[in-house]
Image (cartoon, rainbow, N blue to C red):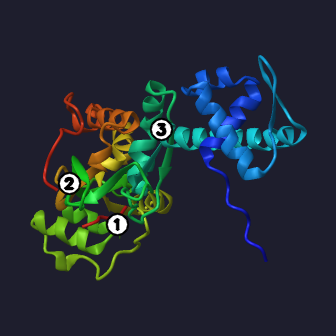
């Protein structure tokens, strides 16, 4: 099978396409920042490569030959396609912000607030990825990642958001049915949802022998949101979860945190991004918005929710 003939120089094709539209070598030169002689030279290169004339030279203008008309139609369409492709790629890069976030943090904290960010930045489209797989920010799989860990990811900048803690939460109906819950041991009247080691740590910190707990949790699901939903449906369970995820439900009374103590974890939540891209408007805008979100409704504070900086293994998403 014969090999296709190599394309002529792209510069010559670009000059030809412009000259075909304008019908004048002088105007073509002005449009492309070239002299008329340079335009004529590029057209001659193309004609020599093809072996036929593309223009009939007139005293004040040029006219396409029949073959030149056929070529002009194809090259014009090709350049329009290239322009659309580059424009689409540029707009996708600049106008779409991709955020990777843990599912529970996303559904319980980020999603209720992201509308405010979009109202402040109407030209930006936001795409949220809640896959539990860590996205490669360097490879462009996400622009921003909201992660749980120690804040140390090679080549990436990490801004501290909040420490991870866990504590028992109860549906309001469970409190009415099985309460009061005056001391930690009272929780043993309920089924316990969530990782057993979290329950053991919390009870030990409260001065209760962890040996009094069952040998395994009554239920452990993929996300904390699922466990809370299951506890509400069951009507006889407590869930060991991260209270900040459910701050609005606590504030509304749908969920009850019967004890103030929250078991501290060694990891935290972090806002992670490629520091080489910090000057990109969409990334800068989201970081500024995220770091200064008020959370007074759940932390009884008026300071920014996420003070900048901090030191940072994954918790249940």
x and y percent of residue 240 in the render? 30, 62
At 54% from the left and 38% from the top, the residue drawn is 91
Instruction: Say what secondary structure mark 2 lies in.
Output: loop
- Residue 103 drawn above or below residue 58: below
The foreground one among 249 and 286 is: 286
How far apart are the two marked residues, 3 and 2, measured between alpha carbons? 54 Å
The foreground one among 251 and 25 is: 25
Is residue 262 visible in the rendered structure shown here? Answer: yes
Residue tagged 1:
190
At 13% from the left and 53% from the top, the residue drawn is 311
Q: Which quarter of the figure has residue 11?
A: top right
* Crowdedness near tag 1: few (<14), some (14–19) or many (≥20) residues, C-alpha within 10 Å: some
Q: Which quarter of the figure has residue 223?
A: bottom left
x and y percent of residue 8 in the render? 66, 52
Q: Is residue 8 left or right of residue 292?
A: right
How far apart are the two marked residues, 3 and 1, measured between alpha carbons? 51 Å
x and y percent of residue 16 in the render? 70, 37
Residue tagged 2:
182
Instruction: Say what secondary structure mark 3 lies in.
Output: helix
* Crowdedness near tag 2: few (<14), some (14–19) or many (≥20) residues, C-alpha within 10 Å: few
Residue reaching furthest to the bottom = 215
Residue tagged 3:
94
Q: Is residue 181 left or right of residue 31?
A: left
Instruction: Say what secondary structure mark 1 lies in.
Output: loop
- Residue 8 drawn above or below residue 205: above
Q: Earlier in the sequence, mark 1 or mark 2?
A: 2
The foreground one among 87 and 159 is: 87
How far apart are the two marked residues, 1 and 2, measured between alpha carbons? 14 Å
- Residue 179 drawn above or below residue 159: below
Viewer-nearest of discs 3 and 1? 3
- Residue 22 drawn above or below residue 52: above
At 13% from the left and 69% from the top, the residue drawn is 204
């Amino acid at each position: 099978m014969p090999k296709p003939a190599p394309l002529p120089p792209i510069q010559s094709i670009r000059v030809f396409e412009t000259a075909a539209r304008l019908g004048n070598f002088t105007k073509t030169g002005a449009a492309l920042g070239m002299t008329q002689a340079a335009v004529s030279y590029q057209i001659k290169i193309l004609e020599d490569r093809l072996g036929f004339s593309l223009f009939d030279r007139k005293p004040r203008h040029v006219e396409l030959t029949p073959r030149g008309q056929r070529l002009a139609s194809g090259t014009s369409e090709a350049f329009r396609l290239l322009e659309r492709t580059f424009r689409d790629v540029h707009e996708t890069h600049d106008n779409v912000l991709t955020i990777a976030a843990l599912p529970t943090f996303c559904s319980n904290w980020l999603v209720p607030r992201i509308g405010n960010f979009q109202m402040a930045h109407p030209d930006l489209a936001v795409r949220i990825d809640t896959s539990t797989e860590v996205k490669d920010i360097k490879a462009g799989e996400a622009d921003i990642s909201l992660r749980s860990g120690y804040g140390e990811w090679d080549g990436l900048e990490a801004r501290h958001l909040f420490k991870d803690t866990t504590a028992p939460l109860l549906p309001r109906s469970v409190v009415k049915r099985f309460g009061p819950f005056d001391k930690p041991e009272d929780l043993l009247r309920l089924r316990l949802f969530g990782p057993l080691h979290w329950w053991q740590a919390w009870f030990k910190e409260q001065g209760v022998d962890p040996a009094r707990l069952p040998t395994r949790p009554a239920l452990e699901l993929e996300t904390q949101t699922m466990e809370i939903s299951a506890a509400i449906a069951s009507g006889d369970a407590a869930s060991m979860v991260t209270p900040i995820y459910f701050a609005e439900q606590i504030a509304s009374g749908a969920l009850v945190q019967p004890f103030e103590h929250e078991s501290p974890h060694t990891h935290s939540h972090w806002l992670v991004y490629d520091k080489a891209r910090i000057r990109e408007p969409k990334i800068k805008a989201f970081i500024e918005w995220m770091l200064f979100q008020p959370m007074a409704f759940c932390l009884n504070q008026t300071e920014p929710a996420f003070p900048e900086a901090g030191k940072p293994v994954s918790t249940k998403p």
